[in-house]
Amino acid sequence: ELWETVKNRGFLILMLAGVCAYTNQGISYALSNYTYSFVWQFKSWTLQLLPFALMLGAALAFVIAPAVGKRTSKPHAAMAFVLAATVFHTMPYWLRFAGVLPPPGSSGLVFLLLPIFVTATALSVSSFILGASMMADVVEDSEARTGRRSEGVYFAGSFFVQKCTSGLGIMIVGQLLDLVSFPKGAKPGMVPVAVIDHLTLAFILIYGSLAILAAILFSKFPFGRTEHEARLERMIAAAEAEGAPHSP
């Protein structure tokens, strides 16, 4: 029964997409201490503002994701959110390479980057919300195929992937710092520009590659709105045939 549950194609696709997405999350979180201090040279007052910016982005996601999910298929919406989040997550580094940003540590830089961080967070969290919603679709499909409700197995698998890949992201960042020869005991403003360039370029390449793979996997998810509605109709009809009235 466990094998019948976990071999569901939709479940496997979500797990693989989750490996990419949550690894990226782990990389972003682990590297943020370095980017905030050494790339952007944020002051203490800026670091105090950052949690509020991230909370605002997460709050917006709980409005954006359901609204978009109701108007289009969840796989396509999740794919679009992942790609858009990648654009905003990497945008500050591209702008830095182009030389159009205010000086590191300046107030102008902070107030330019904070809206980008809010938007990137909102898009990322929206993709995770839709991913969890698609997992509920997998549960419905599994019930239709096997006659069993298996929420526990599916969501336990999802949480397991989250924990493992967050650790994987931290490990990747450690290897990345060694690869670019990031100096130990470094102080903000004292790290060679070439090292900062190599670090940010490597981050863009790794983050972008994993995000594109996650988007491709989301696009392969086998259940769209049409399949979901047809499945619900079949389940309701079956329940009513057994004498248990249901309403959509």
Image (spheres, rainbow, N blue to C red):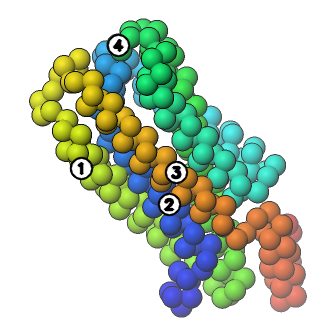
- Dot 2 falls on a residue whose secondary structure is helix
Residue at image point 73% right, 69% down: 223
Q: Tell me the CA gap for discs 4 and 3.
A: 29 Å
Give the image location of residue 221, x and y in percent. Answer: 66, 67
- Labels 2 and 4: the sequence-earlier one: 2
**Residue 99 in view of the camera:** yes
To which residue does mark 1 refer?
175
Q: Tell me the CA gap for discs 2 and 4.
A: 34 Å
Residue at image point 43% right, 40% down: 204
- Dot 4 falls on a residue whose secondary structure is loop
Q: Tell me the CA gap for discs 3 and 1.
A: 20 Å
Residue 152 or residue 92, whichever sits in front:
92
To which residue does mark 3 refer?
211
Q: Quadrant of the C terminus?
A: bottom right
Kindly indicate the quadrant of the structure image that contains residue 240: bottom right
- Amino acid type of the residue that numbered disc 4 sits on in the rendered structure: Gly
Give the image location of residue 166, x and y in percent. Answer: 36, 54
- Amino acid type of the residue that numbered disc 2 sits on in the rendered structure: Gly
Left or right? Give the position of 64 relative to 43. Answer: right
Q: Nearer the viewer, mark 3 or mark 2?
A: 3
To which residue does mark 2 refer?
18
Q: Tell me the CA gap for discs 2 and 1.
A: 22 Å
